[in-house]
Image: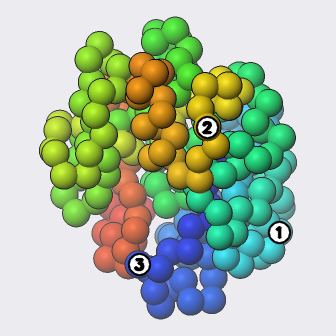
Amino acid sequence: MILAAGRGLRMMPLTTNTSKAMIQFNNAMLIGNSLKQLKKLDFESISITVGYKGAELAEYAIKEGVHNVFNTNEKGNSWWLYNTLLQQLDEPLLVLTCDNIVEIDLEWISEQYAKLNSPTCMLIPVKPIKGIEGDFIQTENNQITTLSRTEETPIYGSGIQVLNPKKINDSTEKAENFYDVWQQLMKQNLLFASEAYTKTWFSINTEQQLHTAEKLYT
């Protein structure tokens, strides 16, 4: 699952007439970085969420091999988890965001998930990069105890997670945003963090970050 419904307001004027997922990154679509890797990994099913300019993004994604497109325009980033057919999925689902430039190490991610006994939800943290915001994570034996934007720790969320949709639906009330989902899971000791991800990772939320990423990852 690639979350690609964000409006990208901080990237104006680049996103005036296109979705954030479809802005150009090194002569390709921004979402293409993750999409190409998922195709090579031969996933049984690839899904995306779309919002602003969703029809254009959906057309592109289907041509690129996406199986399911969920229109979540004006909905929160976790709405699909409770309101689509995926709510019944009782197996691990890899969730990415379209604005991440990341090298997907599926073997490592799978090993981490299995090592933690296939939790309801596992966030994959990274070491903070200056200028990129994230939810700082505190853990005890990999169990997440605190998420904070202000209380700095050695790791924060990357936007990558592995979750079991059915387990989340069975243990939480419907929520529009993942932060609210995570808070519910934390209270039940169901939210975990893997070890820090060491492969390539960068998040693009501004035009400056886009230019920086293009220089770093040619």
- Vertical relation: 12 (above or below) 157: below
The answer to whether any part of residue 176 appears in the image is yes
At numbered mark 1, what does the secondary structure look like: helix, strand or loop?
Answer: helix
**Quadrant location of the N terminus in the rendered image:** top right
At numbered mark 3, what does the secondary structure look like: helix, strand or loop?
Answer: helix
Mark 1 lies on residue? 59
Q: Residue at x 71, y 78 (%)?
A: 53
Q: Which mark is residue 10?
A: 3
Q: Earlier in the sequence, mark 3 or mark 2?
A: 3
Q: Residues within 10 Å of mark 3 (few under 14, many from 20)?
A: few
Q: Earlier in the sequence, mark 1 or mark 3?
A: 3
Q: Residue at x 31, y 51 (%)?
A: 134
- Vertical relation: 83 (above or below) 195: below
Single out the mark in the foreground, 1 or 3.
Answer: 3
Instruction: Please identify the quarter of the rendering in which residue 205 is found.
Output: bottom left
Residue 5 drawn at (x, y percent): 63, 65
- The amino acid type, in three-letter code, at marker 2 is Glu
Disc 1/disc 3 C-alpha distance (Å): 25 Å
Single out the mark in the foreground, 2 or 1.
Answer: 2
Q: Residue at x 19, y 58 (%)?
A: 130
Q: Residues within 10 Å of mark 1 (few under 14, many from 20)?
A: few
Disc 3/disc 2 C-alpha distance (Å): 31 Å
Q: Which mark is residue 173?
A: 2
Residue 125 drawn at (x, y percent): 35, 36
- The amino acid type, in three-letter code, at marker 1 is Glu
At numbered mark 2, what does the secondary structure look like: helix, strand or loop?
Answer: loop
Q: Residues within 10 Å of mark 2 (few under 14, many from 20)?
A: few
- The amino acid type, in three-letter code, at marker 3 is Arg
Q: Which mark is residue 13?
A: none
Q: Residue at x 68, y 31 (%)?
A: 169
